[in-house]
Amino acid sequence: MDQHAAAGFLSVRDQPLEADQRGTGAPILYLHGEAGPDRDAPFLQLLTASGRVVAPSHPGFGNSPLSASITGIDDLTYFYLDMIEQMGWTDLSIVGVGLGAWIALELATSGTNRIGRLALIDAVGVKISDRTTRDIADIFALTDEQIADLAWADPALGLPALTTAPDQLLYDRARARETTARYAFTPYLHNPKLKRRLHRVRVPTLMLWGAQDRITLPAYGAAFAALIPGARFALIDDAGHYPQLEQPAVVARHVQDFLASSRS
Amino acid sequence: MRIYHMTEQSYAPAWDKHQGSLRVNLPNALCEPEVASALFHRYYDDWMLADRLGLDIFINEHHATATCMCSAGVIPLAILARQTTRAKLLVLGYPIGNRPDPLRAAEELATIDVLSRGRLQMGFVKGVPYELPVANLNPVVLMERFWEAHDLILKALSTHDAPFNWEGEFFHYRHVNVWPRPWQDPHPPVWVTTASPSNAREIARRQHVMATMGTGYATKVVNMAYRESWEQMGWGTAPIDRFAYLGLVAIAPTEAKARARAETIASYPRTSGVVHPPFANPPGFFSVEANVELMRAGGRPKPRTFTRDGRAVSTSKGSVQDLIDAGIMFCGTPAQVVDQIIEFSEAVGGFGHLLAMAQAGNLSREDTAENLTLLATEVMPKLRAYVAEKGMVIAAAAE
């Protein structure tokens, strides 16, 4: 497999970072979720109506190499802060999904003034319920079939035929599972300290949630959104944990409208 | 040749009540404390007999499972340190990469060594994949954490002049000072389990005993990696007491009776892998490449167990004869078992410690007692005579 064929590479902190870059205009940083990069997703193309989309594969995901200096979401946050400065972005729009939405919130609470707005989709990253109630389904304790059932409004979409799938898909899936655990196995897919830092999100925030998501329930999403000052919460019908894949046009319209209104 | 009696201390009464998983998510409502207590006392009786017979004792632990009730190996070690008089007490092992507090492990092990007057054999294990969901420490960096814990424990056991400081990648202490210090100097012998040549080389460089468990004829590759690494260090030929092998053992006065006993002992490999599938593949435990291969193969792992002539054998579904052919089980009359062990040992490069699983599942107290007695009185003397006569020829034969 030619690992460099699928997308271009950026160099951040002298480290190669696979990044799908498309469109022109104001910068939009797309941060993918724990399932790995949304390679060639129609949603990314639709987003180009609002600007230049840069969609990196986080270090350890897709074809981006791991870095010895990145062992958790905190390190990843500093890595993306460096990238935002290196790119010279200001008034940056970030679209984040799942674990990518968590990174977006770590960035927004970190103190940078280079971020203009956040569009978050089925986020993880905070603890909402009591200590014996699991907010986020334990993906490491579930079979592929069980995950598809919880994560997709149409579970068949979550079960590609792996025995005949392209190498890249298998590689993306295997790396996503391992690297998600590397960064967020315990505490599981959240930062216990993030909740008490969310008041520092001072930019317009939209939070979209798949109405049929059972990896992270809509009630978790609504409670999460309520912690972010001024955040707007909206459900996406006929979508699970990945509304950007199941309902790309609907999600793109929500995001485009939000980006346009928050820029004016 | 030293021979160790091993039992998983199973709770077999629950084995037919599971819904696809005997580990991690099997409700402990299926455990009756009175039954568990009777089983524990009975397993201790077996160990006391092993001690009287001149066998050594091998303790292990697993978590949240009916396949092994022992969740803390140091508990039986501590009891046996007091109650037995001569057996080596091997823990194989202590899953130090799955524990948040290796200093506590060093303190426990030092105490057991002192209590037993220097009979502790200190085995450290990576552990099986199903241990990680319960341990909840990050499985992706398990081996890095394992080796840091290993280094800390050995330093803690062998430092006697003052408290020392440890601020590592995974563990932080500012006053490490183990009381009592261990009986054995500089510390109890270290054993490590593995099934991979790369780990074998690492273990050789540290001169630890390497144990392989149920690896059958694939043991040869691992043993050879250890021997090569040992030789590359300039230490000559690795002594046979650096190698240990776990096999299932079923011995009886007649072959027919041994086969019947073997059917019960085979319940171990037949239940050991009964687990909700994701728990058998925690993230990072197997490489990305291995996981890609697994997806490509529709989730069916490649066979890992083979007979001497290369026939693949399923350890969970194979017959007793398959297990014997694959070097997983030694079964028959004492004379047959001696022959099987010598044949297997010569084929894989030799080992100086036989870890004998002589009890499993529902094997009764009486059957276990006869099994252990024949192992100690009929098999062990012949193996010892063989090693005394042949010595390192065992290793040379495979090279």
Image (cartoon, rainbow, N blue to C red):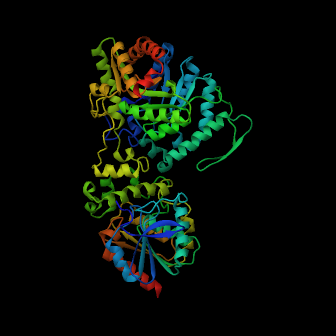
Q: Is residue A253 positioned above or below B195 on the image?
A: below
* Image location (x, y in percent) of residue B382: 42, 12
* Image location (x, y in percent) of residue B183: 65, 25
Q: Which residue extends farthest bottom?
A: A264
A192 lies left or right of B310? right
Q: Is residue A256 positioned above or below B387 on the image?
A: below
Of residues B335 and B4, the one drawn nearer to the viewer in this rendering: B335
A122 lies left or right of B192? left
Is residue B38 something that shows in the picture?
no
Quadrant of the frame with the N terminus of chain A: bottom left
**Residue at image coords 28%, 56%:** A162
* Image location (x, y in percent) of residue A120: 43, 71
Is residue B154 something that shows in the picture?
yes
For residue A170, which quarter of the picture?
Answer: bottom left
* Image location (x, y in percent) of residue B113: 61, 26
**Residue at image coords 63%, 34%:** B107
The mark total stands at 0
Of residues A126 and A73, the one drawn nearer to the viewer in this rendering: A73
